[in-house]
Image: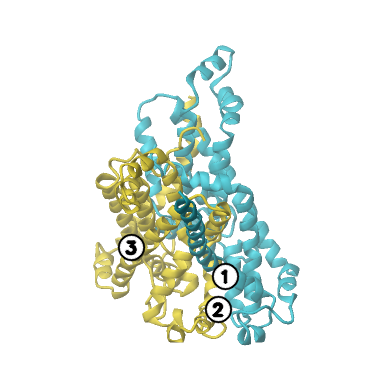
Amino acid sequence: MTIVLFLLPAIVLFALLVLAPIALATYSSVFKWNGFGLFPTNFIGLDNFTRLLGDEIFLGDLSRGLVLIVFSVLIQLPLALAIALLLNQRMRGRAVYRLIFFMPYVLSEVITAVLFTMILSPERGLANELLGLIGLEELESTFLSEPSTVMYSLFIVMTWKYFGFHMILYLAGRQSIPNELLEAAQIDGATTWKVFRHVTLPLMGPTIRITIFLSVIGTIQLFDMVYVLTGGGPVHASETMGVTMYEFGFKRFQVGYASAISVVMFLLSLVFAIGYQRFVMRRDTEGAITNMRGKR
Amino acid sequence: MSLHARDKPAIQVIRPIALHTVVIVIGIFILLPILYGVLGGFKNNQQLSTNPIGLPSPWVPSNYTDVLGSGDFWLQVWNSSFIALATAFITVGVSALAAFVFARFAFRGREFLFTVFAAGLMFPFAVAILPLFILLRFFGILNNPLGVILPQAAFGLSLTIIILRQFFRSIPGEIEEAAILDGCTPFGFFWRILLPMAKPALATVSVLAIVGSWNNFFLPLVVFNDPGLWTLPVGVQQFQGQYSTDTAKVLAYVVLAMVPALAFYAVAERQLIGGLTTGSVKG
């Protein structure tokens, strides 16, 4: 009795507002529908999905997402790791640096994006001004309104906002490694690089795998920042699946088609999450993203 | 010996300098955009184009005072706060009840049900936004704070239940036995003993829920048409659209919109970082 009563609110909330929407999106994705009423009626089978496969914007979304993931894993995460290891040393003002580096994470993506729209603006922007100041005029650019630079600009803004988050995770990961292990390796004659390569890095494996996981899932659903920073433009050069879905679902009332995009986003997350858990994170602790650490 | 004594200080001086240089450069990269915003808000637009980097001269406080004097800004602060607190309250309340059952009772299908909740972690919010909009319209709670609060709470359940269950499990069974012997009902044990003991964990998950809600943009964007309900992120974005040529004023608005989040970060840093790092580390 207690069991049912205690679980009921959670089950109702979860079923109605998490499971039902995903079911509804799946259902609507096989209809042509302008979104009026609760259920669609014009069944068209998998047409929305075949249309997606031929839609250059959507295919572009996929490759742009892949680019952002590659950039994150090859640049943003190693940077965060390096800084975490630096900050792990005994140094004055360490707590202050940590506080500052993590700060952008608590600002919303919208605030970040609006701020950077100004900074990257060609006229009054800070970025061009600074580049001029340090003698790099040739790098001056219109950043966000130029298809060839917009993705780099977006990535820099993402890095500004998120590297501190990854750094914090790495710091926690590093601190869970007993210093005795590293000292033992040093005493055995290992160089700094070897200690890093053969002791620190493997022991931080679980943390690194989780940050990669979070980066990928975050990129699949990236919306706020792009929508405010560029609206997906210029000419779709920075568009993400979330923005495309929003355009079709809320602006053009092609709800069936937009639902098909939602379903693809869902499947990508699901397949990635399951595959990653199964093959990459399998040796790490169960439910590792969320385990409460000991007796905090 | 004397060689050694001279060597050591040299290393001790150079290393920290190199270290500090690197972190200071990164610190500038982080702080400069914010400083640009703060100073930019004190300039007029003409100053911003002729002098984007330097200090304002003269200092123009009117951008800030205009925003602070407008009812819109304060209304958005209130809306954001109300929605964040309500979201945290519902998320944590509902999750605590469920986590209690998952942690301390044995029943058929418990692990299956728990897995269903845990799988919610893999559902990106953006996936559900369109069907959520349709459902909320059907229930008639578009343009109603509940239309944002309830879905946020629902999507917060997974993480909160997982964290709280873990914590509830770590409380020894002897305490429960003693309470039952003293005549406590299961609810009495939950309410009078477990919850007070779980305060640190409850604080952590509440902070996560508040920050998540405070920064949410996509859901309030599609649910609220009525400007009277806008939260800060929606307000900032709309303000930028409306005053796109008045850069200085937009900067002032953005900077003021940052203040509550940064203040909250200053107060709740430990819970926030603790919550985010729990378990991202093995063990």
Q: Is residue A40 visible?
A: no
Chain that the image shows in cyan:
B
Q: Residues within 10 Å of mark 1 (few under 14, many from 20)?
A: some
Quarter that holds the C terminus of chain B:
top left
For the view shown, which residue lies furthest in the front direction?
A: B2
Give how far across and how far down residue A222 sits, in percent.
42, 63
Write down the chain letter for disc 1: B
Give, as a three-letter code, the residue at label 1: Leu
Q: CA distance from mark 2 to mark 3?
A: 27 Å
Q: Which mark is residue A74?
A: 3
Q: Which residue bears the numbered disc 1?
A: B32
Horizontally, residue B81 falls left or right of residue A60, namely right
Q: Amino acid at mark 2?
A: Leu
Residue A121 x/y as whole percent:
52, 81
Which class describes the residues within 10 Å of circle 3: few (<14), some (14-19), or many (20+)? few
Say whether marks 3 and 1 touch (CB < 8 Å).
Answer: no
Secondary structure under the numbered disc 3 in the rendered image:
helix
Q: Quadrant of residue A68?
A: bottom left
* Labelled pair 1, 2 in contact (Cβ < 8 Å): yes
Q: Which disc is residue A153 wearing?
A: none
User: B72 or B52: nearer the eye?
Assistant: B52
Secondary structure beneath dot 1 equals: helix
Q: How many marks?
A: 3
In the rendered image, what is the letter of the chain coloured yellow?
A: A
- Name the mark on residue A126: 2
**Based on the displayed image, in which of its 4 quarters is residue A148 positioned?**
bottom left
**Visible in this render: residue A242?**
yes
Question: Which residue does the image show at 45% across and 29% down from the upper left?
Answer: B103
A24 w.r.t. A151: above or below: above
Q: Residue A289 or A230: which is nearer the viewer?
A: A289
